Amino acid sequence: MGAGKWKSSYYSDTLKGADVYIISDNDDIGKNHVQKVAEFLLGKAKSIHTIDLTSAMPDLLGGGDMSDLIALSSQDEIQSTIEELKTSVIPFIAKERGF
């Protein structure tokens, strides 16, 4: 989707009651975008989790994203990385952000 393109009124309502996993790009803009999206989903999504790709891809270049994982990996490597990412999911907790 890209940072800054979140349409709160549409996407937040579409994800109402869902378990949501948000994957950030490997840059400050992407990480800030994840926080904003998570905040928009508070009170709508059943649960909100953030995923940092660098936990499974430490060599990911700045600005790298999920498409880099897909482009540079075999199907087995993608599946292995996804399994590793599942262990690094961070629940979004509003009180940690001062809400």
Image (spheres, rainbow, N blue to C red):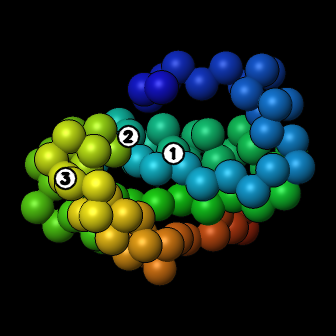
At label 3, counting other C-alpha atoms closer than 10 Å, the crowd grade (few under 14, some 14-19, many 20 or more) is few
- Residue placed at 46% from the left, 60% from the top? 51
Q: Is residue 65 in view from this perspective? A: no
Report whether 79 appears left or right of 35: left
| Distance of label 1 from label 3 (alpha carbons) | 24 Å
Kindly identify the amino acid type of the residue bearing the numbered disc 1: Val
Kindly identify the amino acid type of the residue bearing the numbered disc 3: Ser
Residue assigned mark 2 = 30
Q: Nearer the viewer, residue 82 or 63?
A: 82
- Residue placed at 63% from the left, 69% from the top? 91
Residue 76 locus on image (x, y percent): 28, 64
Kindly identify the amino acid type of the residue bearing the numbered disc 2: Gly
Instruction: Give the secondary structure at mark 1.
Output: helix
Which of the two discs, 3 and 2, labels the residue nearer the N terminus?
2
Residue assigned mark 3 = 73
Q: How many marks?
A: 3
| Distance of label 3 from label 2 (alpha carbons) | 22 Å
Report whether 46 appears left or right of 99: right
Residue assigned mark 1 = 34
